[in-house]
Amino acid sequence: MSSWLLDALVLFTYFAVIMGIGLSQRSTSGSVHGFALGDRNIAWWAVLASILAAEISAATFLGAPGEGFAKRNWTYAQLVLGTIMARVLVSMIFIPVYYRHGVTSIYEYLETRFGGRTRVFASMTFIITRVLAMGTRLYVSAIILVLAIEMFQGRSVSPMEKFWLYAGAVVGVSVLTAIYTTIGGIKAVIWTDFIQVGVLVASLGFAVWYLLGRMPDGWATVTAQIKEPLFFETLLPIKSGEGVGGWILRVLQEEYSVYTAFIGSTFVTLATHGIDQDTVQRMLTARNKRQSMFATIMSGVVDLPVVSAFILIGILLSAFYSQNPPPDLPKENREIFPYFILHEMPPGLRGLVIAGVLATAMGSLSTALNALATSFSKDFLFRGREESLSERRRVKTLRWSTVCFAVLIILVGVWTAYYASMHPEVRIIPLVLGILGYTFGSLLGVFLVAIFTRSRGHDTGNIIAMLCGFAAVLIMSIKEIQLGMGLTRIDQASGQLVPALIIAFPWRITLGTLVTIAVALCFRTPAAKQQEMRDVIPAA
């Protein structure tokens, strides 16, 4: 028991530091500009850390090792290559536009370019999607708590007991994060993110070192477990009698391939880092667009070794447990790493890695809360009457909005905890990325039309285009819809009627983007709005 007291001390120290730093930023969040953008005086390296904290959630901390454990290779990491290219594009395309227009909510730009309907619809799409995506990943941080209880009790917990443990953790982590985010604003988010990324890197490094030290023959034991292909999936050559059309259909059904790495993943990151208020708001706190662009690109460069380290842990765990298979090893891949942490790591360092799990959950949640409050307040509550509200009233509204979104995310998180408890076979990463895939393609499509054209796109037509993008992704992602619509084919292996094509989750944003662009280009921007754009665009 004394060993667990040391872990508890490490965790208590972590929470105390995070809360202290967060609460200390209250004096800097007394204005809307300070609360939402940190007065745009944040150093690039802090912005970089915050971007990493926003995108590495507890789902990644446990889900990526789970992917490595199951696949025993780095095929999941190849998706990061597309994200690096996309961040360069984000820095060249989106960041200059946002700085030039001086936006706080990035959806303000859409009103300038098209009109109020597009702005409101886009902002609401972001809000609903982000609440759902954040809530669905939040329960993951409690997996380690469930395993700890099982370890103490000497038995597996029931699905309902697991749900209550998940729900309690969701509420606890959300309340603590909401407190410092509500009080300290974006600066509290960024500086706590910086600490949390440090804890994350330290825990990752220790986990890799410790696992390698437990291998009987060192790295040779690990290499015996690695499966081909090591990193890239094959080019998926055309099979005999398949034809080009059949080959394309097969490519679109692959989750991890060279094509998803360089095409699907690029579109995913253009969306998550170019038109998602959650991530972009961190970029806009930099002192100027040059520092923002540099932080964004470097976050992609750093992301590759970080994700690779997560996957390496999964491969190391596969090698370790192939040599030492315990009878109670969890059947769910996402629980393997937490099981190792609890059963094998020494006291104190075990607490550090647990803190790393919590750090990822709190870091991604704090950024989401601040972005949701900013977007909702600027695009709905303040819109059209911001000048009539006092600075104090607007900041108070931002803080109350943060609290309200914390409550909404808790509700989604508790529901997801119940679903995950009753359906333990669910995979984390496809679930989280899949939710974003349904809507973010449509958002990206509208922004690309706005930036790259001057005469196409219409305030009402954009909504039609986005709805078409939503519909296309839904139809191509859900088998029940295709079966109901009669979009079927005969499966050659079973001879049964199956959906015509269910695309893999990395392709959803690509499809939504292309459909939205195609429809939006059918509508012409009114001449008056074109002239208005020429009048309001500030000099570069």
Image (cartoon, helix red, strand yellow):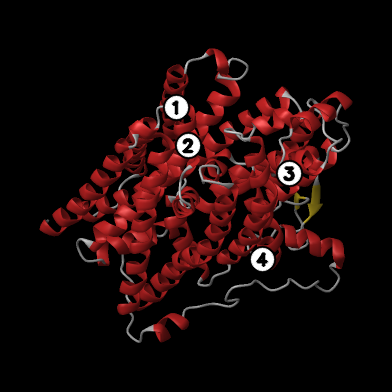
Give me the C-alpha separation between circle 3 and circle 2.
35 Å
Look at discs 4 and 2 and give the one toward the viewer: 2
The tally of labels here is: 4
> Circle 1: is it few (<14), some (14-19), or many (20+) Cα within 10 Å?
many
Kind of residue at badge 2:
Asp
Kind of residue at badge 3:
Gly
Give me the C-alpha separation between circle 4 and circle 1.
47 Å
Residue 329 at least partly seen = no
Q: Are marks 4 and 1 in contact (CB under 8 Å)?
A: no
Q: Which residue is mark 2?
A: 39
> Circle 3: is it few (<14), some (14-19), or many (20+) Cα within 10 Å?
many
Q: Are marks 2 and 1 in contact (CB under 8 Å)?
A: yes
Q: Which residue is mark 1?
A: 31
In the image, which disc is placed on residue 512?
Answer: 3
Q: Are marks 3 and 4 in contact (CB under 8 Å)?
A: no
Marks 4 and 1, the one that precedes in the sequence: 1
- Whole-percent x, y for residue 397 in the image: 45, 20
Q: Residue furthest front?
A: 539
Q: Which residue is mark 4?
A: 257
In the image, which disc is placed on residue 178?
Answer: none
Locate residue 114 relative to residue 324 in the image: left or right.
Answer: right
